[in-house]
Amino acid sequence: MNLREMVFSIPEGGHAMLAFPEPVTLESIEALEEASALMFRSLRRNALEAKGRDAGAIEYDSWVVNPR
């Protein structure tokens, strides 16, 4: 890892890489901070929604198999 490129390990066994533009300026750092915060919030929201849909699908399937 160096100051121009960062590699992060993720729990699923993969890697995520962030490459910085040259030259790294205060403005580019601020833009990257803002953009990455927005991206992570969006990814988190999508993951939570997918998790919620999966639980709902399981519940629905259990009612279809065992109607009462």
Image (cartoon, grey):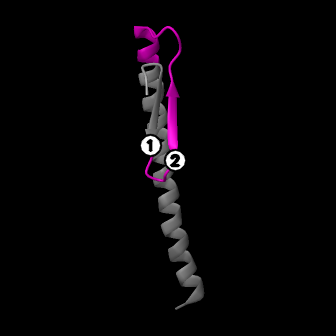
The answer to whether the residue labelled 1 contacts the one labelled 2, judged by CB atoms less than 8 Å apart, is: yes
At a point 59% along the width and 87% down the height, the residue shown is: 65
Q: Kindly state the secondary structure of the residue where label 2 is placed.
A: loop
Mark carried by residue 14: 2
Residue 9 vs residue 58: left or right? left
Q: Which residue is more in the foreground, 49 or 24? A: 24
Q: Amino acid at mark 1?
A: Ser
Q: Position of residue 48 (x, y in %)?
A: 45, 53
Q: Is residue 14 magenta?
A: yes
Q: Is residue 7 above or below residue 14?
A: above
At a point 40% along the width and 9% down the height, the residue shown is: 26
Query: Quick one: label 1 or label 2, which is nearer the N terminus?
Result: 1
Q: Position of residue 5 (x, y in %)?
A: 48, 24
The quadrant in which the N terminus is found is: top left
Residue indicated by mark 1: 9
Q: Position of residue 31 (x, y in %)?
A: 46, 17
Please tell me how crowded label 2 is: few (under 14), some (14-19), or many (20+) other residues with Cα within 10 Å.
Answer: few
- The segment highlighted magenta reads 10-31
Q: Which residue is more in the foreground, 66 or 2? A: 2
Q: Amino acid at mark 2?
A: Gly
